[in-house]
Amino acid sequence: MASFKDAISGDVPVLVDFHAEWCGPCKMMPPILDQVKDELGNQVKIIKIDVDKNKALADAYAVRGVPTLMVFKKGKLAWRESGVRQANELVGIIRG
């Protein structure tokens, strides 16, 4: 698998979902992410990162709470929020 840096560096915006198995609110995100993917198709790449399995990456991005969502555009962090977000909000941020 490509490195995280490679994964976020393309021309397509990347939505990253930092989550954990034990996190209740994180379990609400998959259907929301599916809605985003359904609406945007190839206009977005979605990556899910388990913070317990990828501690170094979570630390590198100072992820303190889950879910933490980030949008990268051409490798640069364009947006970041913690907590559950709705599909229409995420679509707007990605398109913005």
Image (cartoon, rainbow, N blue to C red):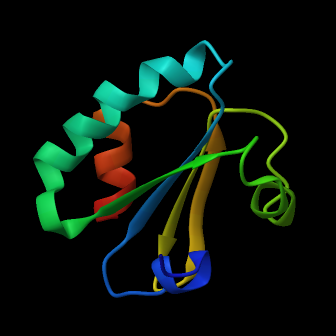
Residue 25: image quadrant is: top right
What's the residue at 44%, 18% (across, down)?
28
Residue 62: image quadrant is: bottom right
Is residue 50 shown above or below 42?
Answer: above
Residue 43: image quadrant is: bottom left
What's the residue at 62%, 29% (across, down)?
83
Is residue 38 shown above or below 77?
Answer: above
- Horizontal side of 66 relative to 36 (left or right) equals right
- Where does the C terminus fall, quadrant-wise? bottom left
Extreme residue toward the top, this view: 24
Looking at the picture, tell me which residue is in the foreground, 44 or 48: 48
Residue 53 picture location, percent across and down: 72, 47
What's the residue at 78%, 55% (across, down)?
58
**So how many labels did they put on this image?**
0
- Horizontal side of 40 relative to 21 (left or right) equals left
Residue 39 picture location, percent across and down: 13, 47
- Horizontal side of 17 relative to 82 (left or right) equals left
- Horizontal side of 44 relative to 10 (left or right) equals left
Residue 90 picture location, percent across and down: 37, 45
Is residue 68 shown above or below 49?
Answer: above
